Image (tube, grey):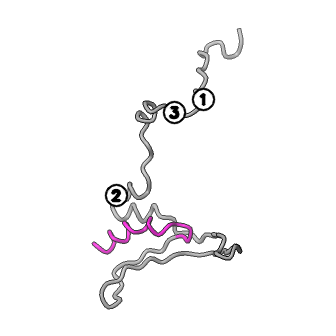
Amino acid sequence: MGKNSNKPPKEPKKRGRKSKAEKELCEPEKTRLQQQVTRPLEDNVKDLPSYCDWGSKLGSNGKPFSWCGYKLHIATGDGGVVLGAILISALLHDSQVAISLTQKVNE
């Protein structure tokens, strides 16, 4: 009589890659862009990070380049009239804001 005599033995996890049948059974998690299409503007803007953030990369000359800050995405009309703007974290890719900015302009 051990401590865990009431628990059934655990099945060992399968090792290696999943088979095609197993991949078809599990649904992949939706990306931010896929979720933005069906959500309202308020939810999309709340989902975007808006904090000041650090980033770095290697420049074309091989030297590191660092930055800290935000990005301001602006949608303008004819003559430079501002139709909408969204402020986000500097590390977020520009494509992640496109749908939200378009929704803001449409309102």
Q: Looking at the image, is 101 positioned above or below residue 25?
A: below
Look at the image and tell me in which quarter the N terminus lies: top right
Magenta range is 89-107
Q: Kindly identify which residue carries mark 2.
A: 39
Give the percent coordinates (x, y) of residue 24: 41, 35
Residue depicted at 58% across the width and 27% down the height: 14
Quote the CA–CA distance across marks 2 and 3: 32 Å
- Mark earlier in primary sequence (2, 3): 3
Q: Residues within 10 Å of mark 3 (few under 14, many from 20)?
A: few
Give the percent coordinates (x, y) of residue 8: 59, 15
The one of 60 and 6 positioned closer to us in this rendering = 60
Dot 3: what SS? loop
Taking 4 as reference, is 45 left or right? Answer: left
Dot 1: what SS? loop
- Mark earlier in primary sequence (1, 2): 1
- The quarter of the picture where residue 34 lies is bottom left
Residue depicted at 33% across the width and 81% down the height: 83
Image mark for residue 18: 3
Mark closer to the observer (2, 3): 3
Give the percent coordinates (x, y) of residue 96: 44, 64
Image mark for residue 92: none
Q: Looking at the image, is 67 positioned above or below residue 33?
A: below
Look at the image and tell me in which quarter the C terminus lies: bottom left
